[in-house]
Image (tube, grey):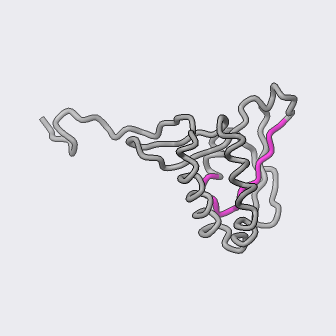
Amino acid sequence: MDEAPNGPLAGPPAGPTLRPATAADLPFILRGERSYIREIEPAAEAGWTNALDRNLQLWVDNLERAAIVEVAGEPVGYYLWMPDAGARGAARLLLGVHRDNPARLLYEQSGFTFTGTDGGYLNYQAMP
């Protein structure tokens, strides 16, 4: 019998899982947001820092719409989503993402359609 790295009958590594975000996740989210700004949009860091309180309040106010992505029990990502947009009267969902943000691949795989550019941002839309 072949030996797997984690034992003789170990299966493949667990894939990503989602769980609801909690207030305890806010430091992880803040570090992720700061890292994104510094790595992907460094020219926007001063403006982001000036709006830090407003941005944090947005996450606090919408925490029930946030989820944490985990791999092997460790947080690796997060998102904020409005799944009831159609029920709230939205005819379409619009999204702008910086062209260097790897999350754009997730949006494309989730059914968002590329609609154009706006400076360094790629614009997408999806029907709820």
Residue 118 magenta-drawn? no
Q: Which of 20 and 125 is in front in this view?
A: 20
> What residue is rendered at 75% in x and 29% in y?
84
Location of the N terminus by quadrant is top left
Residue 69 is situated, as x and y percent measured from the top left of the image, at: 52, 42
Q: In the rendered image of this protein, does residue 33 appear above or below residue 59?
A: below
Q: In the rendered image of this protein, does residue 128 appear above or below residue 98?
A: above
Location of the C terminus by quadrant is top right
Q: Which of 68 and 57 is in front in this view?
A: 57
Q: In the rendered image of this protein, does residue 128 appear above or below residue 93?
A: above
> What residue is rendered at 61% in x and 52% in y?
103
> What residue is rendered at 48% in x and 49% in y?
76
Residue 111 is situated, as x and y percent measured from the top left of the image, at: 69, 39
Residue 94 magenta-drawn? yes
Q: In this view, does 6 lie to the left or right of 31?
A: left
Residue 28 is situated, as x and y percent measured from the top left of the image, at: 53, 52
Q: Quadrant of residue 112?
A: top right
Residue 55 is situated, as x and y percent measured from the top left of the image, at: 72, 55
> What residue is rendered at 82% in x and 62% in y?
118
Q: Which of 5 and 68 is in front in this view?
A: 68
Q: How many labels does the image show?
A: 0
Instruction: Return the residue found at the far left.
Output: 1
Q: Give the range drawn in magenta.
A: 92-103
